[in-house]
Amino acid sequence: MLPHSKLDLILRRHEEVSARLSDGPDAATFVALSRELSDTDGIVEAIRAYRGMRAELDGVESMLAEPALDEEMRALAEAERAAALESLDALEQGIRLALLPKDAADARSAILEIRAGTGGDEAALFAGDLFRMYSRYADLHRWKVEVLSVSEGTAGGFKEIVAEVQGAGVFAKLKFESGVHRVQRVPDTETQGRIHTSAATVAVLPEAEEVDVAINDADLKIDTMRAQGAGGQHVNKTESAIRITHLPTNTIIFVQDERSQHKNRARAMALLRARLYDMERQKLDAERSADRKSQVGSGDRSERIRTYNFPQGRMTDHRINLTLYKLDKVIAGEALDEVVDALTTEHQAAQLAAADG
């Protein structure tokens, strides 16, 4: 059952905002009102369509109530009634989904962190595979990927890689990727054809603005040092690497990839803001959903969420028992939307069930 009084308020507010925009407000107000109008256009259209269909159904049912209605007209009216009921169900479901609480971070860009887990060199190679998968997925959505920090594996891949994924709605698409990803395959170095299992951990954090997180300079310990590792003549000549320690949480950020100390510091602060913002979100989520059984959307990064089995060509997401026998397309980023959409649908179903309960 739809909350019709709430729908009335949405329609009324939409009309008020439209009227205020027509009056030519100042620039800041115009931007804020335009954003509000855009955010509610979809649900307003759905409400109007629902009520229009409801009126049509009432008309058809009035016709069917007429005793003198001939059989041919009655058959047509019954068909119209069935079609209208089907449309109403779909429109009602759409409205109920639109009324669900929105994650304020969904529209944001994201910080993607991938770390090799158990499995040595093979785990680092798998971390590299995952990063390529997300990079290709980002390309398909026309997002921009910028590496913030990287530690390469000895045989290829990455021990750790942190990147910023920029674009509209990135976090909404990637937020269910956080967790332990497991791979089962025969490594190139395996001479007897045995299948090895290794893992990598993925964390997706919403990008934070300065206004989201208040960071006191007195809470920071900032160290500069010479960059280490590959880098030619530049290495060990300038202290461009930055390590920032947030003392209250003992969060440590180390960035050395840019030659400019200023750029490394800016990247480190962006990463620190994202980590602290994510900590606060995790804390609030835990308080709100202490009794939640489903791991979908819980952000539990110690949870094994997915297995990529190369010999069988399958990918299984353990949270929703989804198995796809198209691993090559998933790992290429092409079929990842099938997994993301299924996880989103499951999450919405759980939200609807909680709202109804």
Image: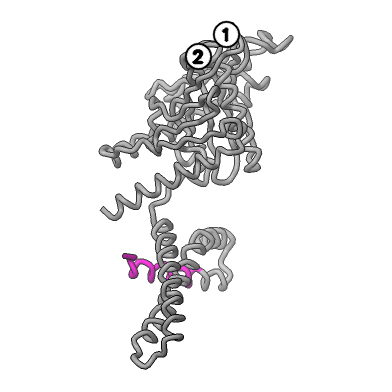
Residue 244 at least partly seen: no
Q: Earlier in the sequence, mark 1 or mark 2?
A: 1
Q: Reply above or below: 261 against 61.
A: above
Give the image location of residue 121, x and y in percent.
Answer: 55, 11
The answer to which of 251 and 215 lies nearer the viewer is 251
Q: Are marks 1 and 2 in contact (CB under 8 Å)?
A: yes
Q: Which residue is mark 2?
A: 196
For the view shown, which residue lies furthest in the top direction?
Answer: 191
Give the main secondary structure of the magenta stretch: helix
Say what amino acid the circle numbered 2 marks.
Answer: His
Secondary element under disc 1, as helix, strand or loop, is loop
Image quadrant occupied by the N terminus: bottom left
Give the image location of residue 72, x and y in percent.
Answer: 45, 85
> Which residue is drawn at the image coordinates 53% and 36% (left, top)?
110
Tell me which segment is drawn in magenta. Answer: 1-17
Residue 231 at least partly seen: yes
Q: Which residue is mark 1?
A: 190
> Which residue is drawn at the image coordinates 46% and 23% (left, top)?
220
> Which residue is drawn at the image coordinates 50% and 20% (left, top)?
184
